[in-house]
Image: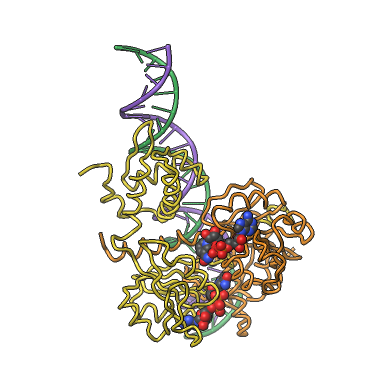
Chain colours: A orange, B yellow, C green, D purple
Amino acid sequence: MSAKTNPSLKAANLPDKTIERLSQYRRNLLQCLAKGKQHIFSHEIAQIHHITPVQVRRDIMLIGYSGTLRKGYDVKELIELIGNILDTQDGLNAAVVGVGNLGRSLIGYFSGKRSKLNIVAGFDVNPEKVDKIYAGVHCYPIDQLAEVVERERISIAILTVPADNATEATEKLVMAGIKGILNFSPKPLNVPPHVYLEEIDMITSLEKVAYYVKKQSGAE
Amino acid sequence: MSAKTNPSLKAANLPDKTIERLSQYRRNLLQCLAKGKQHIFSHEIAQIHHITPVQVRRDIMLIGYSGTLRKGYDVKELIELIGNILDTQDGLNAAVVGVGNLGRSLIGYFSGKRSKLNIVAGFDVNPEKVDKIYAGVHCYPIDQLAEVVERERISIAILTVPADNATEATEKLVMAGIKGILNFSPKPLNVPPHVYLEEIDMITSLEKVAYYVKKQSGAE
DNA sequence: AATTTATTGTTATATGATTAACATTGTTAT
DNA sequence: ATAACAATGTTAATCATATAACAATAAATT
Ligand SMILES: NC(=O)c1ccc[n+]([C@@H]2O[C@H](COP(=O)([O-])OP(=O)(O)OC[C@H]3O[C@@H](n4cnc5c(N)ncnc54)[C@H](O)[C@@H]3O)[C@@H](O)[C@H]2O)c1
Ligand SMILES: NC(=O)c1ccc[n+]([C@@H]2O[C@H](COP(=O)([O-])OP(=O)(O)OC[C@H]3O[C@@H](n4cnc5c(N)ncnc54)[C@H](O)[C@@H]3O)[C@@H](O)[C@H]2O)c1
């Protein structure tokens, strides 16, 4: 067994932040590869992401990969190994729940772009949206959630319903067997431990910017 | 000087995570108030956000507020105090840079909804978008950035241009005197230390969900 | 009045993440 | 050959955050 490509035991429990960075490294490594760059140093990766080279080497160490001294890391191999960690063999299917302004924007952005993560359905309560196609994605009535989730093997929900409907929608998602939720609504959600929940809270992010702007301007 | 409402020295350096939670507490406290609830216990706040009561009390301690024993915190006072920390007296103005699908969605969502944080302009390079109004917000040509930023006292930019244009757009924003950037593009940006940068990386968030779903399903 | 209880406020500890220090080792230069 | 160098890989220290422990106390109960 080659030490070079064996995440095995260690990779079993990677730090959360390392996972985030791996996703980001990969995006930029793909660009490097497209430009014909075959090897890359830790300090180059670090520069792209505005972090320290040590951080990069540590992350790479944790996934059980080794670079070559004086030559750096093999871009292609590294991309592949990150893929082994982040992706499943056959890819996962996702659905957008709440095909409103944000939901449609997300469908347009993600649909058909990635081989290992595909948006295969939308769901909405609004009859005007139901059974229409958005960027190639069929919008189903929410009543058919369980049925379509099973048929289309959907494991991830992107939740973009109004805050007031988020709790109710989440319950349905859990019941339907969804395994992970990316929540865009500004409502704290409660899910059982076997469902992974990730939140994107744009309001808080914006208020945070405002706070630091205020702070920096030394005011009040 | 009342100890009850004096963040003074301590509040000068609140932990980043506390800032995030304060923003979230406030949102839900406002709802409580709307429902007529005048006092609230730390464990109630905790329950809403799925965190521990200790965490809540610690955050509240850090901002220099005190509750009443056996009665909890005064909802209105707490909201006000959080406002003192997060908001500026006169509010801050923001602009959406890149009035595409996501940018328009954000304009529609935020514009006119908040008194202390207002989207007052959009900017784009596309002549078809320039000088149109989106949800009451005027879209200016990007060439007028510096001028409009000064005139409208814009200190925050919400960056929603394509990844390939993000670096260039950021330089313009910094030049124009923007103080904080909320970046939605999946491109690592470089800003001088006096500009605060907050990133929302939806791709990474989604890949993270996929990773944990994969992990939980015990696969591969 | 004394005791119990429910709650806050604070200090101390543990956990997690980053950064620093340093040990290792091919490669290049002398 | 030997020394210097430029990189990686790992262990140790620091820093940030969350949790646990507990001290304080007003209110309720006896
Ligand atoms: N639009 C933004 O840019 C933005 C920014 C920050 C946060 N958000 C949050 O994202 C969410 C969506 O925002 P939006 O602007 O797209 O709202 P929207 O009103 O445009 O869309 C919401 C959609 O959800 C559907 N819906 C309602 N209840 C449902 C249910 N139970 N099941 C399925 N579908 C249901 C509605 O019919 C509608 O199509 C909200 O929670 C909002 O707070 C949006
Ligand atoms: N749409 C989504 O849901 C989504 C999801 C994840 C990430 N993102 C990111 O958000 C950004 C915007 O996505 P989108 O789908 O809205 O793209 P879009 O193409 O719909 O909009 C981009 C807008 O930016 C304008 N633009 C280009 N260069 C500019 C410049 N230099 N200055 C000002 N304006 C400029 C374009 O004219 C266009 O109107 C992208 O970086 C994308 O990667 C979007």
Q: Position of residue B102 (x, y in %)?
A: 53, 72
C4 or A190, which lies in front?
Answer: A190
- The residue positioned 33% from the left and 76% from the top of the image is B177
A151 or D25, which lies in front?
Answer: A151
Count of residue discs: 0
Along the horizontal axis of the image, is B6 left or right of A130?
Answer: left
Q: Can residue B159 be seen at all in this image of the molecule?
A: yes
Q: Is residue B174 above or below residue A66?
A: below
- The residue positioned 71% from the left and 62% from the top of the image is A140
Residue lying at the far left of the rendered structure:
B1
Which quarter of the picture shows residue B194?
A: bottom left
- The residue positioned 49% from the left and 62% from the top of the image is A202
Q: Can residue B186 be seen at all in this image of the molecule?
A: no
Along the horizontal axis of the image, is A173 left or right of B142?
Answer: right
Q: Is residue B95 above or below residue C11?
A: below
Q: Position of residue A142 (x, y in %)?
A: 69, 57
Quadrant containing the C terminus of chain B in the rendered view: bottom right
Residue lying at the far right of the rendered structure:
A151
Q: Position of residue A84 (x, y in %)?
A: 69, 65
A209 or A70, which lies in front?
Answer: A209
